[in-house]
Image: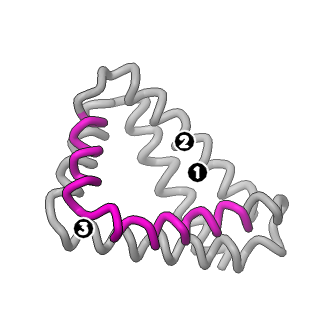
Amino acid sequence: MSVIVTLFGAAIAALGILGLMRPGGLVHFVSVAWQTRVAFHFAIMLRLILGVALIGAASGSRFPDALGILGVISLVAALVAPGLGFKRLRTFVQWWAARPPEFIRVWGLVAAVFGVFLVYAVS
């Protein structure tokens, strides 16, 4: 499970760094990624996998309580997303994409820190 969390953490950190360095690049990536319902369902599946991996890796990590809580949050997000629906989440992505570059950079910073935290927690 630690390997899965490490891969997710590295991917999240990389996207965060992209958002810091090239906010428009992150906005483009996210906007393109959320164009179809298939991508929506894929994102739900990724949240489920991450949630299970976080819970599974929690006991052997540096921060077992934090990873356990994050795993539960990820699972809840995966379960709630279908209820929100593709249109509502796509509307949120469009709102997010219309924010100024400074806003995207803050999201990028948060994502980069979160991704590095995940990698550190299971290393």
Q: Quadrant of the C terminus?
A: bottom right
Q: Quadrant of the N terminus?
A: bottom right
Please report contact status of discs 1 and 2: CB closer than 8 Å, yes or no: yes
Identified by mark 1, the residue type is Gly
The residue positioned 77% from the left and 71% from the top of the image is 58
Q: What residue would you read off at disc 3?
A: 39
Neighbours of disc 3 within 10 Å: few (<14), some (14-19), many (20+): some
* Left or right of 32 in this view: 70: right
* Left or right of 79 in this view: 70: right
Helix or strand or loop: what does disc 3 sit on? helix
**Comes first in the chain, label 2 or label 3:** 3
Q: How far apart are labels 1 and 2 at the CA level?
A: 5 Å
User: Which numbered disc covers residue 112?
Assistant: 2
Residue 50 percent coordinates (x, y): 54, 71
Q: Spot the residue most to the front.
A: 83
Identified by mark 3, the residue type is Ala
- Front position in the image: 25 or 31: 31
Magenta residue span: 68-97
Identified by mark 2, the residue type is Ala
Dividing the picture into quadrants, the one containing residue 39 is bottom left
The residue positioned 58% from the left and 51% from the top of the image is 115
* Left or right of 69 in this view: 10: left
Q: How far apart are labels 1 and 3 at the CA level?
A: 21 Å
